[in-house]
Amino acid sequence: MDTAERGRDALLGVWMSLRSSGRERPTLEKVAVRAGVSRATVSRVVNGSTTVDPRIRDTVLRAVQELGYVPNPAARSLVTQRTDSYALVVPERASRVFSDDQFFPGVIRGVSQELEAADKQLVLMLASSATSHARIERYAMGGHVDGVMFASLHGADPLPHALARMGIPVVASGRPLGHQTVPYIDVDHAGGVAKAVRHLLDQGCGRIATIAGPQDMVAGIERLAGYRAELRDSRRRSIVAEGDFTRESGALAMRQLLEDDPQLDAVFVASDLMADGALRTLRQAGRRVPDDVAVIGFDDVEMARYTEPPLTTVRQPILRIGRELVRQLLRLANGEEIEPALILPTELVVRESA
Amino acid sequence: MDTAERGRDALLGVWMSLRSSGRERPTLEKVAVRAGVSRATVSRVVNGSTTVDPRIRDTVLRAVQELGYVPNPAARSLVTQRTDSYALVVPERASRVFSDDQFFPGVIRGVSQELEAADKQLVLMLASSATSHARIERYAMGGHVDGVMFASLHGADPLPHALARMGIPVVASGRPLGHQTVPYIDVDHAGGVAKAVRHLLDQGCGRIATIAGPQDMVAGIERLAGYRAELRDSRRRSIVAEGDFTRESGALAMRQLLEDDPQLDAVFVASDLMADGALRTLRQAGRRVPDDVAVIGFDDVEMARYTEPPLTTVRQPILRIGRELVRQLLRLANGEEIEPALILPTELVVRESA
DNA sequence: GGGAGCTGTGAGAGCGCTCTCTCACGTTTA
DNA sequence: TAAACGTGAGAGAGCGCTCTCACAGCTCCC
């Protein structure tokens, strides 16, 4: 007993030099003593229970103030089984374009805003390597967070569903591929593409090509499908090249398209970043935009206003995707039922490129 | 009371159905029973203690496997007083340009990579409003994280120092203004600017203007100071306009400069984003770059390769800033001494704009 | 051959909090 | 006036883990 105490004191000594530089962090107990009440009552006050006498309440609050009491989240989590923080996973390949693209930063901002409003914390996981898959799983399963959001899915990633099956609230941005399903937020890709293609037709364009996104991502797939469907309806031929959502791939794909069909007079590009690449290729090839070739992008990131010429594009509500991701996840974590899919509207923003 | 209880029970019911879907998460205790050893031994194995008999070790590991045991972080934190997660704060105004600029995403990536390597978690706090100041303080003081990084400081923000005084490990990116000091990482602004200005002089430029950044941010201040110092040394006149690191402000500042001194033949711009704005203004004004006006930016974000013409710029190692931020913070949290300032080198990347 | 020194395991005491249960004290009702 | 009821506070049992200490079993050397 004696020795036990000494040991503990030694440990405390180390802590003190490391953290709080001498100042002990007050506990519920200390506040209770100071206020002359029990721990339970302080807990009630701190957690906003209504069944506390107003006078006692005030006394406790004063004690809290004076001691600078802040609840210990670990202790709280241990008993409540909640952490009040949520993970946002931005999977591997998506993060490659992380710095260049503006989609993920936008989603992160939306997520952050909405979580802040709910007084929850954001744990960001940029899954940069294959090993981080296991890491994310362990992390989520360990109960570090109350739920997980996936900012973008590649292929038929089994992770979201695996987590959901373990009872962890999960929401994805973008419809998950494969038959395993989790609740998701997505935008109306087809509707947006339809508006874009119709706009091109309205401008009198006859040979409308597309630069598609990667076909293992739902955004790539659906935008291409939308394009094909719309052209089929208007009995036009599809002219397709595929990129990977990077600027370079857009430039390259555009060169390919010009070779395949030098007569094309319009191109719908599945992302703004690729569209920027395409615009550069067209400029180099001496084609005027939109006079010779009209160009429409997708996303409406900030950059779209600053391309040469400014890009006509399909806007998706990026910030709102992030916000809705959080709202749905919080509902789920709160035990509410949510619809398995929430589709946000897209709209055509006409600038100068088409 | 009755209703409260029923409410809680309902909630519990929901949890059970939501989480662990009937499956109780195994505890150390269960693993210990299964392996036929004590909790302490299991703990030792799980935490990689070397003083465990290899055979017992294997038995325990098997039990861990079979039960799918994952340690409960809250319980662990409660006793160790560590959380193994670190906060990255991106303060208010900086986050305005968050989606457009590529600096913060780059820093975040660096931070994320380095934390992942150390098996620590990243809590991202985009401080979007004035109220979040208090929130960050409470959060950090509450012991949610083992340390805090500030991605950028505005003015003489007292928060970093306040946290540091409370014994919380803190590292900032960019030298903090004011006399309150915390350890920081920064780049060699002056050195970079000097290289830029000298390059312009070498190209035969005589009237070198600058578009400075906001003068409440150390990056803005030091880059302007560097410019002034270098021009003074070569006995030239300073021609200064100020922006706020946004593209628009760069465009506007450039217009101002052209009015102030139509004869200028070079401009050093304190950020790539502003430089892009400046290039647009110059193009509109019919000035050729670099023939009529040479332009050099600062940052070397991805976008700099894609301006028209590609931007000559001062590279700062953005990813590395993030990584060093983490390394220093981990040392600090580990009780090691660290140098109060770590200055990373900058280098001139010559492309076509100068 | 017996004490000294290792090595490795178990016992047990918390970490700081929440939540149930119990009980004291008023207030209302028969 | 006594019994029934409602209200608000305290006691105490954990949540799941780590860490110190005690001690059993062993080797080693005088």
Image: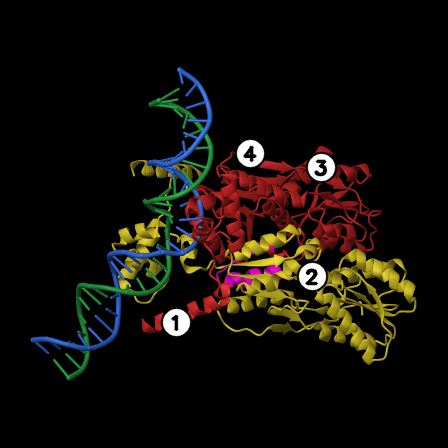
Chain colours: A yellow, B red, C green, D blue
In this figure, which residue is indicated by the disc labeled 3? B194
Tag 1–tag 4 contact (CB < 8 Å): no
Q: Secondary structure at mark 1?
A: helix
Mark 1 or mark 4: whose residue is earlier in sequence: 1
- Taking the image as shown, residue B342 lies to the left or right of residue B35, namely right
Do marks 2 and 3 share a subunit?
Answer: no
- The front one of A129 and B165 is A129
Tag 3–tag 1 contact (CB < 8 Å): no
* Mark 3 vs mark 4, CA separation in Å: 25 Å
Classify 10 Å Cα crowding around label 3: few (below 14), some (14-19), many (20 and above): many
- Residue B94 shows in this picture: no
Residue B88 position, x and y percent, is 55, 50
In magenta segment, residue B17: no
Do marks 3 and 4 share a subunit?
Answer: yes
Report the amino acid beneath label 2: His
Tag 3–tag 4 contact (CB < 8 Å): no
Classify 10 Å Cα crowding around label 4: few (below 14), some (14-19), many (20 and above): few
Chain letter for mark 4, please.
B
Classify 10 Å Cα crowding around label 1: few (below 14), some (14-19), many (20 and above): few
* Mark 1 vs mark 2, CA separation in Å: 40 Å
In this figure, which residue is indicated by the disc labeled 4? B339
- Taking the image as shown, residue B135 lies to the left or right of residue B190, namely left
Q: Secondary structure at mark 3?
A: helix
In this figure, which residue is indicated by the disc labeled 1? B7
- The front one of A78 and B294 is A78
* Mark 2 vs mark 3, CA separation in Å: 45 Å
Report the amino acid beneath label 3: Ala
Q: Which residues are magenta?
A: A107-125
* Mark 4 vs mark 2, CA separation in Å: 42 Å
Q: Is residue A19 above or below residue A276?
A: above
